[in-house]
Image (cartoon, rainbow, N blue to C red):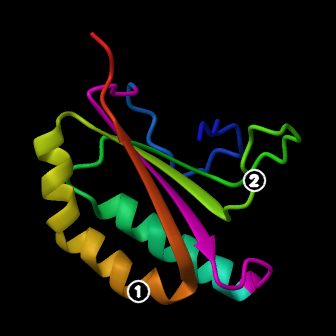
Amino acid sequence: MLCVIISCQDATSNNNQFDKNFVHTVYFWLNNPESKEDRKLFEESLNKFLETSKYAKTNFIGIPAGTDREVVDNSYTYALVVTFSSKEEQNLYQKEEAHLLFIKEASSLWNKVQIYDAIGLD
């Protein structure tokens, strides 16, 4: 499945140069996507996590763009794209306190997470 993220860029997005060494793309499906309260809690926890992560170089938070094409999946609630300088940095990110706290705080808000990791072509 090929998903293209064209969406609203969050104000907390890091303006550093996009790093193609390791790209971590995460799609979240919230239990109650229409709940403003749940969305607020999720966004606050996600932003706090990204602001305190030691390893995430750049990030993008978005929502479905609503593009109406057969190949586009608009069923998710949020998309997160995070870049890292290496696979090793991404492995450290998985275990860092900020990431684990985000999972603890927000995992009850979602019912599905789908992740795509990629490395850039030389």
Residue 94: image quadrant is bottom left
Asked whether, in this view, residue 117 is left or right of residue 81, the answer is left
Q: Position of residue 99 (x, y in %)?
A: 28, 69
Residue 82: image quadrant is top left
Residue at 82% across / 39% down in the picture? 70
Residue at 19% across / 73% down in the picture? 97
Give the CA distance from mark 1 to mark 2.
25 Å
Q: Describe the element under mark 1 as helix, strand or loop.
A: helix
Q: Describe the element under mark 2 as helix, strand or loop.
A: loop
Q: Position of residue 2 (x, y in %)?
A: 60, 36
Q: Nearer the viewer, mark 1 or mark 2?
A: 2
- The amino acid sitting under disc 2 is Asn
Q: Which residue in the rendered view is the most extreme toward the top?
A: 122
User: In the rendering, which numbered label is found on residue 74?
Assistant: 2
Q: Which residues are magenta?
A: 18-36
Q: Is residue 3 above or below residue 109?
A: above
Residue 20: image quadrant is top left
Q: Residues within 10 Å of mark 2 (few under 14, many from 20)?
A: some
Asked whether, in this view, residue 84 is left or right of residue 91, the answer is right
Dot 1 corresponds to which residue?
Answer: 105
User: In the rendering, which numbered label is found on residue 40?
Assistant: none
Say if mark 1 contacts mark 2, CB within 8 Å: no
